[in-house]
Image (cartoon, grey):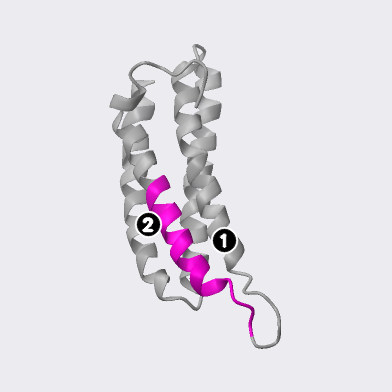
Amino acid sequence: MLHNTPPNLSELPIYRKALEILALSQNISTYLNDDLAPLKEDGTEDSNIYFTGDIVQQSVSLVPEIANAELQRHSERKHKHVASLRQLTNLLYKNSYRLERSNSNGKDFLPILRNELKKFKKLQLSWMLSL
């Protein structure tokens, strides 16, 4: 992870929720990839497969942004990481809707991801006030 990890990081509810979102995104991506990886009858690939990687990458980036915000001493720098975290959360939300239009049984798990993202957004608000 990071060289200078804040000692209280693992105790933060937002950190724990970010880890849950990461695990959920990885599982959803794996499930969807099995359905979306085969080529279509015309030999083209399903463009929705790229969104599976996007949700994993965005989920991976949540924890470092939280840690970086916690490590910063200046509020301006903290807020940069908070803004980045907010943007990642919004992108995750948007990509979950894009994936829901895919031709896969795994799309039924995407509302669960969005529900966890809603909880994460609420945690973000209270966490921002504590920075």
Residue 19 location (% of width, % of height): 38, 40
- The answer to which quarter of the image holds residue 124 is top left
Secondary structure at badge 2 equals helix
Tally the marks: 2
Residue type indicated by callout 1: Phe
Taking the view exactly as shown, the residue that stands out farthest to the bottom is: 41
- Disc 2: CA contacts within 10 A as few (<14), some (14-19) or many (>=20): some
- Disc 1 + disc 2, Cβ < 8 Å: no
Quarter of the figure with the C terminus:
top left
Tell me what residue is drawn at x 47 percent, y 61 percent. Answer: 30
Q: Indicate whether residue 39 is drawn in magenta.
A: yes
- Tell me the magenta residue range: 22-40
How far apart, in angstroms, are the residues tagged by discs 1 and 2?
15 Å
Residue under label 1, please give it: 51
Residue under label 2, please give it: 114
Which mark is in front, 1 or 2?
Answer: 1
Residue type indicated by callout 2: Arg
Residue 83, placed above or below residue 51:
above
- Point out which mark residue 25 bears: none
Question: Reading the chain from its start, which is encountered first: label 1 or label 2?
Answer: 1
Q: Indicate whether residue 54 is drawn in magenta.
A: no
- The answer to which quarter of the image holds residue 20 is top left
Residue 55 location (% of width, % of height): 51, 53
Residue 81 location (% of width, % of height): 52, 29
Tell me what residue is drawn at x 65 percent, y 88 percent. Answer: 41
**12 sits to left or right of 5:** left
Tell me what residue is drawn at x 33 percent, y 40 percent. Answer: 17
Residue 29 location (% of width, % of height): 48, 60
Tell me what residue is drawn at x 45 percent, y 29 percent. Answer: 66
- Disc 1: CA contacts within 10 A as few (<14), some (14-19) or many (>=20): many
**44 sits to left or right of 17:** right
